[in-house]
Amino acid sequence: TGTVVREGMTLISRKETPDRRESEVLQKRRSADGAGSIVVAPLVYSGRVIGTLTAIRSIERDDYTEDEAALLTAMANQSAVAIEQARLRDATRAALTEMQALHAVSEALTKVTDPDDLLRVLAEVVSIALEADRVFIVLTDLEKEAITRTGFSGPDDPPDAEMQFSELWEGLGGWAIRHRQTTVARDAADPRLVAASTKPGAGPILAVPLLYRGKPLGAVLAENPPGAAPFDTRAIRLGSAMAGQISAAMAHALLFEATQRLAATDELTGIHNRRRLFDLAEHEFRSAVRYRRPLSAAMIDLDNFKSVNDSFGHAVGDEVLVEVVRRCAGVIRDSDVFGRYGGEEFAIVLPETGHVAATALAERLRQHIAAEPVLTSAGPIPVTVSIGVAELTPEISEFHTLLDHADAALFLAKHRGRNRVAVG
């Protein structure tokens, strides 16, 4: 066979007169196996030998004739064409699948901007492209040794427990990130699968690192059930190509999210700035008016804050503001809209809340803030606040009017001696 591949010519070996290129060892073995005449024809396609066609007769039968060898040679040529065409079809089908997968990733990037939603959609795309049973896309912060976000796709619901960083790092995903290299495990016996599987009894796993400008962002983990065929070369190549797109997309999405957050966040306290406060409050106000649901607003102002700045400086005043915000955040609900109105004034919009419940919450806030002095670099400073509360009524048609009512109540609280709650 080696001779045929090298020379590209058909070889006939007969019982009594074997081809001189057939080794003595092979002749003895052929005789021992009861093989007689042999024809080996090259599979030739576009002038290149891609394999061989071998025909063997038992030792009891007559030798192959030249005509039979010519027929086998013609059959070999036809076989070569059929094999190459099948290969081309497979290659074309694989290339089309890869193009469709990469296009699906690109399409997802144009339609989804939220990082969490994008991760979920991309996990589904990867699962389909790689024909994987389950896919995790995991983003990490290596300095903090933490998983920051995950996207999941699979026939079952996402696992109840979040994957721990140690599980990722000690397993195949961590191996891929550390070595910056795509890798596969055939089954759970792979030593790199210590705690790497997303469920017990892991089957084949493909792990692809997510890298952007040389910085590791996380990994893609694709998994199939136990007993399934390992991920092949095509899957490795396609997974790596998709990971490049995913890495760039997630880096840009996270940067955009951070930019948006900075644009909507008060730099000092980290809560909504005035613009974002009004945007969210307007949305809640319109919803309450439309569906005739209760809504209240509260204005908070630090008492005698100017004296804090005058006595201790603005840096200490900033420390006080940050701590007051922290204490407020511990009392208000997740559904409430909390933002910095300006200076030492803050506003809270309370959906689904009438003036009675709003007043009770404001009182809890007041007590919580006044309970202990604020510890600053200049020492402990007693701090109190005055709060004005107003409820949406049929006469109020604009959010600004509701806030004006809360502001008027705040003025009343100040006028009555500060450190109190008033209702407008």
Image (cartoon, grey):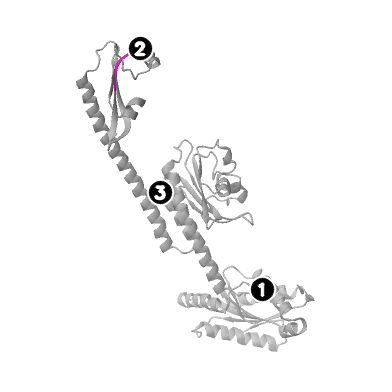
Q: How far apart are marks 2 and 3 (CA)?
A: 52 Å
Q: Is residue 346 magenta?
A: no
Label 3 amino acid? Ala
Label 2 amino acid? Ser
The image shows residue 153, relative to residue 79, as above or below, that is below
Q: Is mark 2 on a helix, strand or loop?
A: helix
Confirm whether residue 123 shows in the render: no
Q: Which of 3 and 337 is in front in this view?
A: 3
Pointer 2 with pointer 3, Cβ within 8 A = no
Q: In front of the other: label 1 or label 2?
A: 2
Q: What element carries label 3?
A: helix
Q: Give the range drawn in magenta.
A: 32-39
For label 2, count other residues whose C-alpha is less than 10 Å away and answer few (under 14), some (14-19) or many (20+): few
Q: In front of the other: label 3 or label 1?
A: 3
Q: Where is residue 142 in the image (x, y as percent from the top left)?
A: 61, 55
For label 1, count other residues whose C-alpha is less than 10 Å away and answer few (under 14), some (14-19) or many (20+): some
Q: Quadrant of residue 333?
A: bottom right
Pointer 3 with pointer 1, Cβ within 8 A = no
Which quadrant of the figure contains the N terminus? Answer: top left
Residue at horizontal 43%, vertical 42%?
Answer: 233
Q: Name the residue under label 3.
A: 129
Dot 3 or dot 1: first in sequence order is 3
Q: Position of residue 15 (x, y in %)?
A: 29, 12
Q: Mark 1 points at which residue?
A: 325
Q: What element carries label 1?
A: helix
Q: Mark 2 points at which residue?
A: 31
Label 1 amino acid? Val
Q: In front of the other: label 2 or label 3?
A: 2
Dot 2 or dot 3: first in sequence order is 2
